[in-house]
Amino acid sequence: MSEEIKNADHIFSVLEANKLPDSSIYIPVAGGSYFEHMGGVKMADYWLSKKFDNRDECFVVTNAFFSMTGLLIKHKYKNEWKLEFDVAHLFQVKSTAQSIVAINHLVKYNCYSDAYSICRTALSRLNLLMLFAFNPKLFDEWLNNPKHEKYLDGHVRAELENNGIKTLPHLYEFSSEIIHGQVEGLANIGYLEMGLFPEHIGIANNIWVIFKFIIGMAYCVVLNMAILDFNGAELPDDVKEHQGLFNWFLEHYFVFNRIDHLFALMAEDRHMEKIGKDKYYAGGSFQFAEFATQLAKFYKKGQKKKLSKKYDI
């Protein structure tokens, strides 16, 4: 038996052991093969054990996201807005691929502060992707005038929140502290301890959790735009399989109150947001279901939902 076949058998066996839906196992494998072929992280570097950690799970989600991109070629767009969105999505794919490679190297060598900066960049990129999903025509305008104030991250986040979508502002604030070298943020990731590269397994885990959720939300955006493009018609089998895999992720990989997720996704006391009398927003996960609900309102027949005036072009 060739080494290649042995490796393939191992990959499928560990994914089966982690109870991924049988009909969807090929999805992260196909995405991982593409990623590796294009110079990304080799599949031999992860999924080594049948007991997955958050790094392994992150590569399952990331590879599924890359696999989703292949459907753009297979299924021609039905609506002009889908083509406009696909251009915006594909424009970001290279940056996403480079981010996962960067995080993989940075965490390996305990460079946690730089890894957090990659997470914040990915979060800002995701915010734009969600905005372009609500109105794909914005991408072309952004491309020609990216410095316009309405495309500043704070303005984009505010617009998304006005449409019921919170984008983990506490993580943005926390990673901003780290990027700007503020002591509180750096202390939280072990920067002040002895040595140039102190190892912190818990901090490494938190980074993989954060990136897993960010890529998971990007997958949610791209998948829901693909589903809406079929205008309520029967979905092709491969789109259904992606839908089934994503729903499985919701029950297993994107569970906010999993003990290994809580420390990554909970806000520090200083980042808690007051939302009412004696009520505070203490952090949390992305609102996957709420995003799908809100997005559908922008594409329904009849009176469609629109963004605020400055984004309604």
Image (spheres, rainbow, N blue to C red):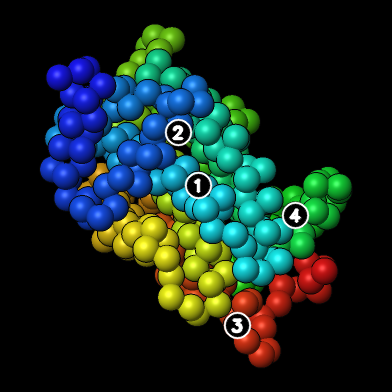
Task: Say whether disc 4 or disc 1 marks the residue closer to the N-terminus.
Answer: 1
**C-alpha span from label 2 to label 4:** 26 Å
Q: Secondary structure at mark 2?
A: helix
Label 3: few (<14), some or many (≥20) within 10 Å?
A: few
Residue on which disc 2 sits: 34
Q: Nearer the viewer, mark 2 or mark 4?
A: 2
Looking at the image, residue 48 sits to the left or right of residue 37; the answer is left
Residue on which disc 3 sits: 300
Residue on which disc 1 sits: 70
Instruction: Please say if the residues under marks 2 and 3 sit with CB atoms less than 8 Å apart.
Output: no
Q: Nearer the viewer, mark 2 or mark 3?
A: 2
Task: Say whether disc 3 or disc 1 marks the residue closer to the N-terminus.
Answer: 1
Under mark 1, the amino acid is Gly
Under mark 2, the amino acid is Tyr
Instruction: For residue 297, say whether it is visible.
Output: yes
**C-alpha span from label 3 to label 4:** 21 Å
**C-alpha span from label 2 to label 3:** 34 Å
Under mark 3, the amino acid is Lys
Looking at the image, residue 36 sits to the left or right of residue 138; the answer is left
Q: Nearer the viewer, mark 4 or mark 1?
A: 1
Q: Position of residue 174 (x, y in %)?
A: 52, 42
Task: Say whether disc 3 or disc 4 marks the residue closer to the N-terminus.
Answer: 4
**C-alpha span from label 4 to label 1:** 21 Å
- The residue positioned 40% from the left and 15% from the top of the image is 109
Instruction: For residue 270, say whether it is visible.
Output: no
